[in-house]
Amino acid sequence: AEKGVTESKSFTETEALKDRLIDLVAADRGELLKKLDGYEVTRFDGKKQVLQLKELQIEIYSPSFRQTFLSKILDPNIAFVLLILGILGLYVEFTHPGLILPGVAGGILILLALMALTLLPIRWAGAALLLLGLVLFVLEAKIASHGILGIGGSVAMVLGALILVDTSVPELKIRLSTAVAVTLPFALITIFLLQLVIRARSLKVVTGAAGMVDEIGVAKTELNPEGTVFVHGEWWNAVAPERVEPGAKVKVVRVEGLK
């Protein structure tokens, strides 16, 4: 038994039975119960007990929906995907207020991901790298870095995902394929949406009173200092800082009420 741990030595069932590593060998569950019927065992408190298994009925217990669901999201790969999708949903809601669905779905996915991740051993360095990746994606959309910030953000997020879970068990680590498959689309979508928002905010207002500023019109009457001008397809009362002849071009510098 010690060699099985220290030297990873394995044994066949025949060898294990011969060396008394096990008590018996059974081909299936029915044979196992038959051999154990009348078998005497010693409990931890030293008492002897004879197993009576002949008349017992076997009941099969299957995982409930709740247990199955929780076992799925506790997979760190699934938790990572849920986290990224949740962040993307909230980001879409913040950049496009009023959609509601992305915000609600994103909040739910983030909470599910955090619930799973809190049950796993997390490295804060991995979480910091994920946060750094998000920051670099935002900067990529604002600064002309020729893709350097975007590439850096992708590398940071992939590395963060790979070291996020502090364990030596391969099944509890986020796979490289998952990290890359999630990070690259997320980076492209985030940078694209953020660029749209930045461009929209930088565009000149073209509606309402603010949209009239810098428009060029024509003086329909003399402005000395008040008069009438034709701007933006509309007649407006206007005030000029100096006398303007009828028919001269004018430029709107400010709008106050209907003047």
Image: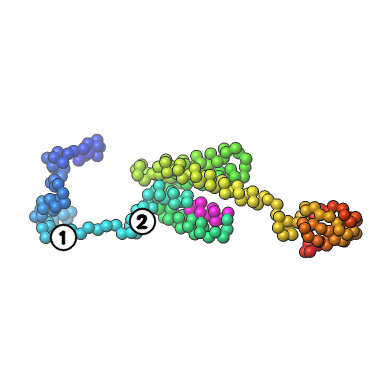
- Residue 118 visible somewhere in the drawing: no
Mark 1 crowdedness (10 Å alpha carbons): few <14, some 14-19, many ≥20: few
Q: Which residues are magenta?
A: 86-95
Asked whether, in this view, residue 191 is left or right of residue 81, the answer is right
Q: CA distance from mark 2 to mark 1?
A: 29 Å
Asked whether, in this view, residue 146 is left or right of residue 207, the answer is left
Residue toward you, 96 or 86: 96
Q: Which residue is mark 2?
A: 69
Q: Quadrant of residue 37?
A: bottom left
User: Is 93 covered by the magenta stretch?
Assistant: yes
Residue 211: x and y in percent read 73, 56
Query: Mostly what secondary structure, the magenta segment?
Result: helix
Asked whether, in this view, residue 226 is left or right of residue 137, the answer is right
Residue for point 56% across, 43% down: 136
| Mark seen at residue 239 | none
Q: Which image quarter is the C terminus in?
A: bottom right
Q: Amino acid at mark 1?
A: Gln
Asked whether, in this view, residue 158 is left or right of residue 20, the answer is right
Residue for point 78% across, 60% down: 234
Residue for point 34% across, 59% down: 66
Residue toward you, 27 or 23: 27
| Mark seen at residue 57 | 1
